[in-house]
Image (cartoon, helix red, strand yellow):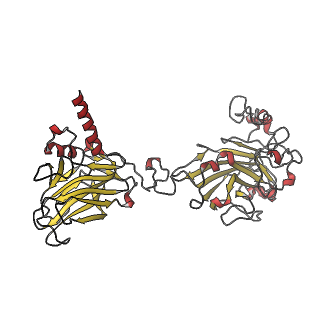
Amino acid sequence: MKIINKITATLLLATSAIFGNAQSITLDCESAAPFFQRTPTNNIAFDRANCWALGAFSYIRTTVSLPSITGTFSARGNSMSNENANSSAWIKSPWIKMASGNITLNIRMEGTSGTGGALGSGSYKAIRIRLVTYDPNVISSSKEGSFLADSFTYLIQSPYTNVQNISYAVPASIVGNNNVYKVMISFIGAGGNNRAIADDIVIPGTYWSNPSNNCLPQALIVDADNDGVQDSDDAYPNDAARAYNNVFPSSGYSTLMFEDLWPSLGDYDFNDFVVDYKLNRVTNAANKVVEIKAEFVSRAAGASRPNGFAFSFDGLANSKITGVTGNKIFTPNPHTFNANGTEAGQTDAHFVVVSNIFKVLIPQGGGSGGVNTNPTAVRVPNDTTRMTIAFNTTTNTTNLSEVTLAKFNPYLIVNQTRGTEIHLADKAPSSLVNSALLGTADDNSNAGSNRFYKTKNNLPWAINVTSSIPYMKETIDFTKGYNNFIDWSLSNGTTNTDWYLNLSNFRDNNNLY
């Protein structure tokens, strides 16, 4: 039993040395078989079975006249008299995902014959290290492609029979790029017939050959843009600056509805502006926000005044934004803008989507109001505004947590009067609001307690729901279309949270547009 345990331990150690780990792959010419079973023949067969290739090399056992470099065995090549690195004696590694570090090996000459000349002269011996690329499109069954341009040549030094350590730094350009390579070590020279003894080859990286499939690479992580995200997971496989889409809602659209007579309650039909929206927060491989692609579909404008529409993310700094495109700004314009496209004069970054809703939902006959709220009037096509907000990814980085739905703060700007804003319940107004209007008429806002845009009974002036829903016909109270809305509002949003769904007895479709 003790003998079996020792054999098993030896097998495990040998297998680890050949396959390697995330740090290095090693060829030490020692077999996985216990010593008493080893022969040079079964040693080299074991390594070849694990995808090492040895051209014109055999393994030698330690003798007095021909000692190995370390351990019991070393590799001995044929005569180093061929200057062609492809057809000389050579050792080629399995496929490896390269890591940073040095490729190292120990060598010595069997004798001194034919050594001592300069590289390329009539008598010299040298080692050449090159990296073989993987090319699935080549005819060869090995799928070996071309050599990298980067290579290393070492001229064997005197005294030639001493062990010499060779070290070659892995090119930084191939470290961590998810491609695989083979390391080919050629033993070249001119003049004489001396041979090299090689041992202790160490290559930094991860073993990536499949011995059961003709030593071809294991399944590769294909990463065309080298951003560290495999193409199957990368929404932008050819763009290293982008990797993931973070879309809300995940399908369809959400709906915003506004009542524009704040701070008075008005007719409370919530169709003064109805807009569907979808937000895609695009992040890079490090999951930092690169841009926001925002889509707003204007559906109805039951108001009589030319309102505008904008939004922010609470606490998002202006310095994090580098550009805003796609928004619709018309003359006359109540806004001024920073160079990066955000609205000027704001503490946070604010984005104007449409400065005048009646310029995108144009009232019939040139009048004002009532767009797509009267079922007997001609319907105006929906208008879609697609905005892109670019983020600074060099001096500033933005986490997804900074642009969540909870921080999304959309609002109406009433009648081209910049200070008159209508936000969702308990969403703070912008720096440009006319704060004198807060807490007047039916509004029960109290900035000191962070209470905003609610009546004393918690009724809001703006609604945000996570799906696209129908809106009210003109002048019909919202509670006549959504039966559970009033209970939800009075409870401050704690009950009847599904009031907007199309379930039995939830809606009166006769009152919905």
Q: Is residue 276 left or right of residue 231?
A: right
- Figure quadrant of residue 249: top right
Total labels drawn: 0
Image quarter in which the N terminus is found = top left
Q: Nearer the viewer, residue 179 or 114?
A: 114
334, 285: nearer the viewer = 285
Foreground pick, 196 / 414: 196
Quick check: can you spot residue 375?
Answer: no
Is 446 positioned to the left or the right of 249 in the image? right
Residue 508 in the image: x percent, y percent? 75, 33
* Place of residue 411 in the rendered image (x, y in percent of width and height, measured from the top left): 74, 51
Q: Residue at x 78, y 63 (%)?
A: 334
- Farthest residue toward the right? 441
- Quadrant assignment for the C terminus: top right
Q: Based on the displayed image, in which of its 4 quarters is residue 11 positioned?
A: top left
Percent x, y of residue 346:
74, 59
Task: Point out residue 134 in the picture as x, y percentages from the top left corner.
Answer: 31, 54
Q: Is residue 266 left or right of residue 72?
A: right
Q: Residue furthest top?
A: 1
Q: Is residue 155 visible?
A: yes
Q: Nearer the viewer, residue 62 or 332?
A: 62
